[in-house]
Image (tube, rainbow, N blue to C red):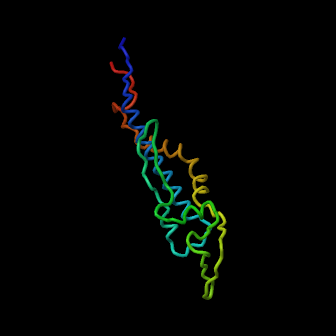
Amino acid sequence: MAESSLIWNGPAVTDRMRAAQIAGVNRTMAQAVAHAKANHTWQNRTGVLEGGIDIVDYAVPISGGVKGVWGVHDVRYALIHELGGVIVPRTAKALAIPQPGGGVKFVGKVTIRAQPYLRPAADATYPRLADNIRKAYDKSAPAAGSASGIGGSDG
C-alpha cells in the first residue's frame, strides 16, 4: 500500500491570503469612492469636493491584517459637509456671504447642516469586503497540481 503524506505550504497560503486581503480592501475602497461620488446630496458647483474623494492610501500589510484609507484629501471644507457644524469668523467681526443677484450679507456665524456622503458610502460598501476578499482569493487559485497551498498525497 502506498504511503500518503500531507504537503503543507503554510507560507504560500498566508501570502496568497494577504494578497487577497489587499486586493479586497482596495476593491472595497474603490466601491466606496464611486458610491460617495455618485450619491452625495450636496449641489456640486465646482467639482472640487467630489474630485477630492479618492483612495488616500492603498492597502498595505500591517501587523495582523491589512490597512487602507479612503476619503477626501486636500479639501479643507470636506469635514463640515460630512458632519455639519457652525462656522464663525476667526479674525474678522463677521462672515461675508455672497447673495444671489449680487451684494454681500454680513453675519456672525453660519450653521452648515450635515450632508453625509462618506458614511453612507461606507455603510453601503463595507458589507462587500469579505466577498471581495474571497473573490480575490479564488481568482488567485493555483493551477491544478500546483505546489501552492495544501497538497494531497505524495507517494
Q: In this view, does 60 lie above or below 47?
A: above
Name the residue at 57% across, 58% down: 118
Which image quarter holds the N terminus? top left
Q: Is residue 140 above or below residue 8?
A: below
Residue 150 falls in image quadrant = top left
Q: Where's residue 77, x and y in %?
A: 54, 66
Name the residue at 49% across, 53% down: 29
Residue that extends furthest to the top in the rendered view of this protein: 1
Residue nearer the viewer, 30 or 154: 30
Residue 13 falls in image quadrant = top left
Residue 103 falls in image quadrant = bottom right
Name the residue at 39% across, 28% down: 10
Name the residue at 49% across, 65% down: 75
Residue nearer the viewer, 55 or 30: 55
Q: Where's residue 83, x and y in %?
A: 62, 60
Residue nearer the viewer, 79 or 146: 79
Q: How many labels does the image show?
A: 0
Which image quarter holds the C terminus? top left
Q: Where's residue 20, x and y in %?
A: 43, 42
Q: Where's residue 36, x and y in %?
A: 56, 61
